[in-house]
Amino acid sequence: MMKRILLALAGVLLLCAVPSGLRAQTLQDILQEDPELVTDASRRTVGEVLERLVESELPNVPEFLSVWQDRELYFRESDGLFYYVEDPDADELTLIDIDTGEVAGTSGSREIDQLRPNRGVQTVIGSALVQFQLNADEPRVRRTALRAIDRDPEEEHLPLIRELLETEEDEDVRNAASALLTKLTIAFADSDEARVAAIDTLRGNISIEARAVLNPLLATRTEVAETMPEDANIARELEPGSDDLPLADAYEMLVAAELAPPLITDEERLDTLEANIVDGRVGGIPLAQLNTEAARERAYDALIASGAAEAGSTEAEIAEIVAGYAFYEEYRESSVAVTDAAESALASIEGSVALYNFLDLSLDALSLASIYFLAAIGLAITFGVMGVINMAHGEFIMLGAYTGFVVQSIVPNDTASIAIAIPLAFAVTFVAGVAMERLVIRWLYHRPLETLLATFGISIAIQQIVRQIFGTLSRPLSPPDWLAGSVEFNDVVSISSIRIAIFLLGVIFFVALWLILNKTRLGLEVRAVTQNPAMASAMGINPDRINMLTFGLGSGIAGVAGVAIGLFAQVVPDLGSNYIVQSFMTVVVGGVGNIFGTLAGAALIGFLQKGIEWMNPSNTLAAQTYMILFVILFIQFRPRGIIALRGRAAGD
């Protein structure tokens, strides 16, 4: 036992005999060289200990800096050592060695001090920490460091970003660093030439970040001086008494700058009147008569005349005083070259934003037109071939949406459910349309008023049946995950994936219908019945059968449109009512019985409605009203629509 003790003492003596420079240096060793630089850190002195830590190249320095910056570093005066703490809220604190990360004992909360560096010290520590993160091996860590700099940029970060770009190979990190370098150069570069060159790189950049960098350069403050200063960066002169600078505000600026005496307030005037009450009178006017503003003004004028009160400035005098000074807005940025470059760059950006806003509005209008086309194409077929005003067309759209909901309730996979729902919705509404045509419509041909009333009654009946089955609450029809997002071209132009899918669906149906009507026997018979039913019948075509199939086809297409619309609209019993008016407007404007006309009508209605909504975004109901007025006016000049139907039916 004694031998072991002697060996241990010899080891300690040998360790003490080794020069300190030859021993491996630890964090604690560095901090103990001058612990007051840590415990009483200031922005002016903290750089010395940070320099030692950086030069040590110890792997645990970044963790230490992060803990110190977050005010989670502790110092125990009894042994003069620094510690981490496992649970700062506990009464008995568990101390963690800053070098090994192992438990180094416990301490009472009153025996150890938590170090709380101020904001300035935290900023300097953050800069040192960022330097470590920018040199990290993982691109993710370097991107995190760049985001930290972007949140709180400092002038000392500028050379760090330049050094990073010299060696950086990761494309994402390089892009982020380049954007940040532009921002820091504009804010902290020494020369105006460098700042202007950085600003010029932002021309046409429509990102929010670019505008956030440029807008502060054009921030102004309102100033007043005896004469317009020659060395100031003036944004514009202000005319007192104008909307930009009311006369009262201009005079208040003079008072605040001690260039004019303050105006007498109502409270000061009342205090003066009260102080000059003599024998129940003020300025010779009895107190009982001072119940109006005019009487109080007469009393105060009497006190002015007797020298008992100070005269206030009249409006004419205020205007005269204000006219003797120069009022102006001055850029907070002192460099004229920088503000001129920023104004020019922002003007370029605004031009690009206006163009992209137009493209974004056009995409919205195109998506709306595709929705109207899908909703109206079935109606165009039935209305064009048979001349039937089907007020229940919207309910076929609604039935298609509920078919999608039922399928999705059974099939959990959203993609598979939508793939099943589209043909099933077509089949369900096709059968419903055929049944409606066989039971009701075929007995009312050439009786438009009775047909309108009958189909309107059927639409109400279908709505009530659906309410009894599914209730009145909205039913979810969830799109697949690959349709849940949106396609963003830039910060201005974007379109939801669902609307793109609906547009493609509209294109598919347009092509399919064109092929059916122009390349199949059914299409030939439909066109024959449309143009001349009597002649078609004489040629062996059964118009009754064609009417049935055509009505079923139009109803089936409405069901498919219902599935598409249900992906972004609320699936409720009155869903179809929201589209029946637009469907009829699309058919009438485009031209009855022509799919090209329906396409043209949907495009016109969609673009016009979006344009009206853009001009009056706070009132979407007004857009619907204006659209109806437009359709009424349009059919006065072109009653057959954009593309008129040819043949005998055109004259019916």
Image (cartoon, rainbow, N blue to C red):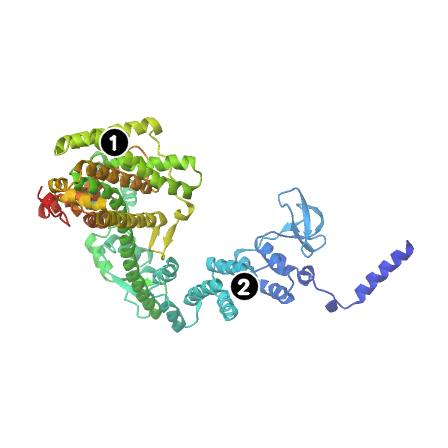
Is residue 110 shown above or below 198? Answer: above
The amino acid type found where label 2 is placed reads: Leu
The amino acid type found where label 1 is placed reads: Ala
Is residue 62 shown above or below 450? Answer: below
Question: Foreground residue, 620 or 155?
Answer: 620
Where's residue 354, x and y in %?
28, 58
Secondary structure at numbered mark 2: helix
- Pair 1/2: label in front: 1
Please tell me in which quadrant of the rendered image residue 11 appears. bottom right
Q: Residue at x 39, y 49 (%)?
A: 485
Outermost residue, right direction? 2
Where's residue 222, x and y in %?
31, 59
Does the image show residue 307?
no
Q: Return the residue at label 1.
A: 435
Q: Which residue is drawn at 30% across and 60% down?
A: 350
Q: Does 232 sit left or right of 5 as displayed?
A: left
Q: Return the residue at label 2.
A: 134
Secondary structure at numbered mark 1: helix
Question: Foreground residue, 557 or 12?
Answer: 557
